[in-house]
Amino acid sequence: MPVPYNCMLTIDINCDLGEGFPNDSLLMPFISSANIACGFHAGDTDTIKRTIENCVKNKVAIGAHPGFKDRAKFGRTEMVLSDCELYDVVAEQIELVLNICTEMGAMLHHVKPHGAMYNMAARDTTMSYIIAGAIKEINPSLILYGLSNSFLISEAEALGLKTASEVFADRTYTPEGMLTPRTEANAFLHSTEESLSQVLQMITQQQVRTTDDRLVSLKADTICIHGDGDHALSFAEAICKAMKENNILIKTC
């Protein structure tokens, strides 16, 4: 359902950071939330500390970004873990970032799963329940960032967690409202104009056009932009400019 015109529109802009790409510090002025790699798919303790320091300096909300232990393929390999193994993998990574935040006098704001873990959990109620349960056990005030209309959101809400429904600026959507797999040729929008048009549609109309040219409803609390592309910085600037021109306030969830 489109948002009434008399309502003030707000959106959070999040970005995955601490993953070894060069734009992290330059992206800070254009985002409101950061998802920090926790060492399993990328990053290490020193990188986490530097990223937290940058977040504090730029008033960007700090998030843990746990993934599978898969540095070789950047956490994008699907893995089958037992329930206990999944819980431990998620908890270990969140606790690492939380402990570093505490040492530095910073506050952990949210958790967003990474890569294959994110996409698998979006389709799997059990995985989503375990991830949400780990978050709740560690700190029930943490917000779970998850794919809009997915089990990541519904299972977290069933456990009483606050959630932020995430949409993607540069990804296409399947007829079911899920992200088109990266292995598909049409998984990404390659022009800034297409991406900005999709972003504005998702925020103002709460809809997205799918790969079969249908409109599906979704909730857009936070937009993910990627920091690892050649045009990451210019795209972040373009997103912020578009938000300002359309009177959309960039605000942390």
Image: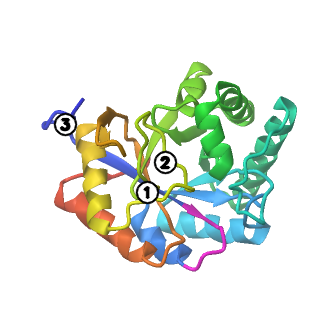
Question: Which circle's residue, 3 or 1, is located before the other in the chain?
Answer: 3
What residue is shown with label 3? 7
Whether residue 93 is visible: yes
**Residue at numbered disc 2:** 180
Q: Nearer the viewer, residue 98 or 200?
A: 200
The numbered mark, 3 or 2, whose residue comes first in the sequence reads: 3
Q: Which residue is mark 1?
A: 186
Q: Is residue 159 magenta?
A: no
Amino acid type, label 2: Thr
The magenta region covers 16-22
Disc 2 crowd rating (10 Å Cα; few below 14, some 14-19, many 20+) is some
The residue positioned 32% from the left and 68% from the top of the image is: 191
Q: Residues within 10 Å of mark 1 (few under 14, many from 20)?
A: some
CB under 8 Å between discs 2 and 1: yes
SS type, badge 3: loop
Q: Which residue occupies 38% across, 68% down? A: 236
Task: Determine whether, in the image, residue 43 is placed left or right of residue 118.
Answer: right
Residue 252 sits above or below residue 5 on the image: below
Q: Which structural element holds mark 1?
A: loop
Measure the alpha-carbon separation of dots 3 and 1.
34 Å
